[in-house]
Image (tube, helix red, strand yellow):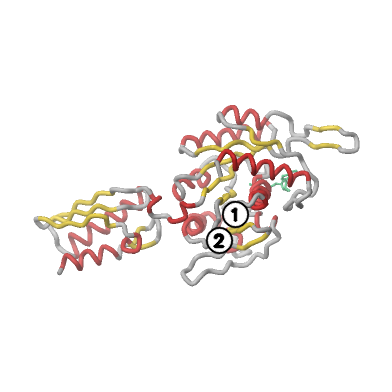
Amino acid sequence: MSEKKLYNALGLIIDPYYDKNLAELDSIKIFNIENDIVDIKIALGNKTKDQEQVKLEIAKLVKITFSYKGVKIEVIDSDRKALIKEEKYIYIGIASGKGGVGKSNVTANLAVAFNRLGIKTGVIDADVYGATIPYLFSLPISPLDVTDDDKIIPANKEGVQVVSTEFFMPEDKPVLWRGPMLGKLLTHYFNEVAWENETKLILIDLPPGTGDIALDIKEYVPTSKMIIVTTPSLSASHVAIKAGLAAQEMNHDIIGVIENMSYFYDAEHKKYHYLLGEGGGKKVAEKLETELLIQLPMQENSDKIYENNHMNAKMFLALADRIKKILEL
Ligand SMILES: Nc1ncnc2c1ncn2[C@@H]1O[C@H](COP(=O)(O)OP(=O)(O)OP(=O)(O)O)[C@@H](O)[C@H]1O
């Protein structure tokens, strides 16, 4: 009887990694008691600190509350694939290193291009400090609805499904406040979004930087891939290389490099102007031993989704098609 009670009580312990209890997550894989020693084999999220917390809770319950002599706890499967249902999607992080290189613009327009190719795509705007995706899509800023089982229903524009921290951030809160909120929100974005049926790709607009969240995605989606955005300039490419190398160290598979704002084409005089220099994208691709996927021109009024017949829209279609082939979609 007490065995059953202990098993039930163990099931109520929360795995902070998923913010769900062990019973819901079906985490207890083996539960055996012999000679007053409880033997537990358990599948947990991949974060050491969270694992230690769960182990401590288990030990307290077994030894103090239920007075067993001893407990053996083994984490047998920290692979979240089995636990996160959304692994059916391909997640692609769009990273840049330096801010302002057009990462959000690329993410939004690439998502539209994938949809135009018939590949249903969602966007997670994880750039808390410069969340621009909702504005690029002209979406109203208000909290998104949730389903009966508490999943976030993405906003939808141009066939692209969008979730953004911006929808949930009170306007008057300072930017500093956003950091602590981020982990919590990201956990939701990777577990609790009601993406439409047949969604294949999820693009993640990452905050600029070479560390923290950009790389932490691995914590949420072990299989996520990366695209690095840079401009041709030395300063941007230098930081992009750092971001890419750090991502590779975390075993992220880098699909390739996008060079944005590569040149300005003066149609009247039929002349190309390389305003930000040349060669940044090529250099990043070489260093990371990956492909320079495309060089996108500078455009006036680029804070938008390009119309179907716009030159940049055509280039984004070609880019989406290239990525589709690389991913064998
Ligand atoms: N191809 C382009 N031609 C001209 N301007 C561009 C181009 N791409 C982006 N921009 C402009 O550059 C600015 C920065 O773009 P965006 O917000 O997409 O960059 P970002 O890398 O996501 O920046 P952050 O990470 O700081 O949010 C915007 O004003 C955008 O309109």
Say which of 159 and 245 sits in front.
Answer: 159
Rendered location of residue 40, percent (x, y): 22, 54
| Residue at x-position 73% and y-position 35% | 262
Q: Is mark 2 within 8 Å of ligand 1?
A: no
Q: Which of marks 2 and 1 is nearer the N terminus?
A: 1
| Residue at x-position 58% and y-position 59% | 163
Let me know if residue 104 appears in the view. no
Query: What amino acid does circle 1 point to?
Result: Lys
Quarter of the image containing the N terminus?
A: bottom left
Rendered location of residue 107, percent (x, y): 64, 48
Say which of 151 and 96 sits in front.
Answer: 151
Local crowd size for mark 1, using a 10 Å CA cut-off: few (<14), some (14–19), many (≥20): many
Check if mark 2's residue and mark 1's residue have beta carbons within 8 Å: yes
Let me know if residue 207 appears in the view. yes
Q: Dot 1 corresponds to which residue?
A: 120
Local crowd size for mark 2, using a 10 Å CA cut-off: few (<14), some (14–19), many (≥20): few
Give the quadrant of residue 256.
top right
Q: Dot 2 corresponds to which residue?
A: 196
Q: In the displayed orientation, state which residue is furthest to the left.
A: 35
Quarter of the image containing the C terminus?
A: top right
Give the quadrant of residue 11.
bottom left
Q: In the displayed orientation, state which residue is furthest to the right.
A: 268
Residues at marks 2 and 1, CA–CA distance in whole angstroms: 8 Å
Q: Decide if residue 200 is on the left or right side of residue 41.
A: right
Rendered location of residue 21, percent (x, y): 34, 63
Give the quadrant of residue 228.
top right
Rendered location of residue 309, percent (x, y): 78, 49
- Circle 2 sits in a helix, a strand or a loop, which is it? loop
| Residue at x-position 38% and y-position 58% | 16
| Residue at x-position 19% and y-position 60% | 62
